[in-house]
């Protein structure tokens, strides 16, 4: 049996991170599970105050494939490097130089959306941080 996975990011400001990751991944807001018509109603059903909907964001790929992403507010600050991080794979074929140029262009696009460049591993990948310093990598998709 195949299982699906969701990834969860702890945060201080769910709205800011949700907007960044929707831009980075092309994800959209995930609607609340039926029969609920709002995330606040779903949270209230599970014993959470209705205003706690602002403390989280739930995202999914547009086509429904791949992992969903939950972004949840936590009281403590980030204090160390992530133990798990997201790799963004830039699609497209071509020469190594063309593939690297697409990686750098994607890193520039994400920097304009609020990310920060941390490390460039020339011709392979870049390490970046989202607006709350969660590390992620940008690299070319595999050649196969």
Image: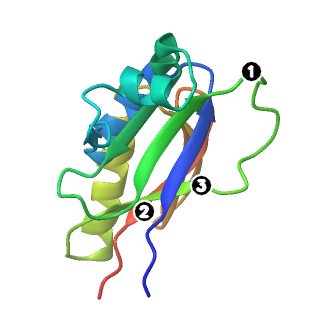
Q: Residue at x 47, y 29 (%)?
A: 45
Disc 1: CA contacts within 10 A as few (<14), some (14-19) or many (>=20): few
Q: 25 above or below 124?
A: above
Q: Position of residue 98 (x, y in %)?
A: 25, 66
Q: Residue at x 48, y 42 (%)?
A: 70
Marks 3 and 1: CB-CB under 8 Å?
no
Q: Which mark is residue 75?
A: 1
Q: 31 above or below 139?
A: above
**Residue tagged 3:** 85
Marks 3 and 2: CB-CB under 8 Å?
no
Q: Position of residue 96 (x, y in %)?
A: 32, 74
Q: Residue at x 34, y 64 (%)?
A: 66
Marks 1 and 2: CB-CB under 8 Å?
no
Quarter occupied by residue 111: top left
Query: Could you tell whether 45 is left or right of 26 in the image?
Result: right
Depth check: give the residue in front, 44 or 100: 44
């Amino acid at each position: 049996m195949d299982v699906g996975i969701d990834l969860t990011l702890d945060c201080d400001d769910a709205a800011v991170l949700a907007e960044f990751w929707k831009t980075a991944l092309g994800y959209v807001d995930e609607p609340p599970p039926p029969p609920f018509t709002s995330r606040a109603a779903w949270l209230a059903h599970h014993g959470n105050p209705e205003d706690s909907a602002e403390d989280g964001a739930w995202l999914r790929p547009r086509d429904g494939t791949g992992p969903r992403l939950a972004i949840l507010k936590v009281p403590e600050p980030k204090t160390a490097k992530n133990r798990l991080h997201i790799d963004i794979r830039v699609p497209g074929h071509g020469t190594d130089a063309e593939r690297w140029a697409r990686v750098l262009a994607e890193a520039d696009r994400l920097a304009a959306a609020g990310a920060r460049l941390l490390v460039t591993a020339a011709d392979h990948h870049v390490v970046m941080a989202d607006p709350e310093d969660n590390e992620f990598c940008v690299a070319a998709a595999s050649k196969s």
